[in-house]
Amino acid sequence: MADIRFRGNLEVVPGLATDVLEIGEDPAVPGSKRFKSIWVKDVHADNVYASNLVGDPDVDGSKNLSFTVNSDAVNGTAENAALVLKSSDGAATRSATFTMDAANLKVTLDRKLDVTGDVVSSGNVSGTWAGTAVSVAKGGTGATDAAAARTNLSAQALDATLTALAAYNTNGLLSQTAADTFAGRSVVGTANKIAVTNGDGVAGNPTIDIDAAYTGQASIVTLGTIATGTWNAGGATLGGPLNVKVVTQSATADVDDTASVVLANTGVGGITLTLPAVSGRTGRVYIFKKINADATALTLDGNGAETIDGAATFAACDAQYDTVTVVCDGDEWHIVSKIIA
C-alpha cells in the first residue's frame, strides 16, 4: 500500500475505520499525519491527497465515498478542488480538477476519459471524442469519420447539387441553368394569341390554349380547329385530304364565313346570294354551283356597292351544274374560274 495524505483536518468517523496505521508526519507538509493504509468499510484508496475538507468523509449504503470541500461558490467566487491519483512508485499521476461556481460544476481531466459503460447526460459535453465510436443504438454514428457515419446512418453523401437544391426557395417550375445552379421559371403566353393558365404550376397544372382574342398570326401549326381568324400558312403541304364546309341554299340569303362551297337550288323563281363585305376578307374563296334543273338563275351580289369583276352582280349561272369561283382581294370580288353551259 502506498501513501495516503490529507492536507487539513481529517476526522475518521467512529466505527468506519477498521485499520489505521500512523507512520509519522509527511515531510513535505508540516503538521500532517501520514498513514500506511486506511480502510473505510469496503472502500480502499491508495495515494489519495485531500485538503480543505469540511466534516467527515461519508460512505453511503452503496459504499460510495464522498468528501465535502470548502467553497465560496455560493458567494459568487469560484473555487477549485483537485483529485490526484498516483502510482505506487509515485512516477505517474492522474488528476481531475473540479471548478464550481454559483451555477455550474466543471470537471477537467488531464488525460482522456475511458468509458466502458453507457454515458448518460442531460447537459452539455464538450471536447474531442477520441475513444471507441459510439454505436447507433447508443445515439452515436458507430463511426469515427463522416463518410462511415453517413453509411451507418443510411444518409445521402454530401453533394453540391443537393446543397444547391436545399438552398432553392422559389415557387414555380424548376430549371437548371448551369451546373448546381437553379432558377424558377413560368410558362407565359403572348397577348391575344396564346393564353396560359397556372403558368408556374403553383395552383395547378399549366394549361395552354388559343387566346379568346386571337385574330390570326403569320405562322401557326395546329392539330385542332381554328374557328376564327386567318391562317396564313405559306407553302403549307397537306398530308391528307382537304375537307371544306359545304352548305345548300334554297332561298335568297347572305353568305357568311362558315362555308366554302355553296350548292344553290334556285327553284322556280331563282335566288340571290349576297357576298360578305370585302373588308378583312382578303384571300377568301367561295365556290358556287347551281344544282337544280329549273331554268332559273343563281345571282351573286356584292355587299352594298361592292362589285364582282367590276359589275354589281353576276347572274350567268342559270343552267344545272353551272359553277363559278370567286376570290376577294380586299377591294372587290374576282371571278377566277367558271363553268357555264
Image (tube, helix red, strand yellow):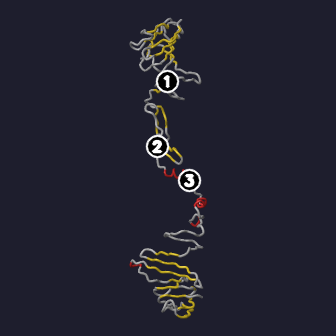
Q: How many marks?
A: 3
| SS for dot 1 | loop
Q: Is residue 195 above or below residue 126?
A: above
Residue at the spot of label 2: 203
Q: Are marks 2 and 1 in contact (CB under 8 Å)?
A: no
- The three-letter code of the residue at mark 3 reads Asp
Q: Is residue 114 above or below residue 292?
A: below
- The three-letter code of the residue at mark 1 reads Asn
| SS for dot 2 | loop
Q: Are marks 3 and 1 in contact (CB under 8 Å)?
A: no
**Whole-number angstrom distance, CA of label 3 to CA of label 1:** 52 Å
Q: Earlier in the sequence, mark 3 or mark 2?
A: 3
- The three-letter code of the residue at mark 2 reads Ala
Residue at the spot of label 1: 232
**Residue 276 percent coordinates (x, y):** 43, 17
Q: Nearer the viewer, mark 3 or mark 1?
A: 3
Along the line of sight, which residue is nearer the eye, 213 or 341?
Answer: 213
**Whole-number angstrom distance, CA of label 3 to CA of label 2:** 31 Å
**Whole-number angstrom distance, CA of label 2 to CA of label 1:** 36 Å
Q: Quadrant of residue 48?
A: bottom right
Along the line of sight, which residue is nearer the eye, 125 or 315?
Answer: 125
**Residue 33 percent coordinates (x, y):** 51, 92
Residue lying at 50% horizontally and 41% vertically, measured from the top left: 205
Q: Earlier in the sequence, mark 3 or mark 1?
A: 3
Q: Quadrant of the N terminus?
A: bottom right
Q: Nearer the viewer, mark 2 or mark 1?
A: 1
| SS for dot 3 | loop
Residue lying at 49% horizontally and 24% vertically, measured from the top left: 232
Say the numbered circle drawn on residue 159: 3
**Residue 137 percent coordinates (x, y):** 59, 65
* Residue density around tag 1, few if under 14, some if 14–19, many if 20 or more, within 10 Å: few
* Residue density around tag 2, few if under 14, some if 14–19, many if 20 or more, within 10 Å: few
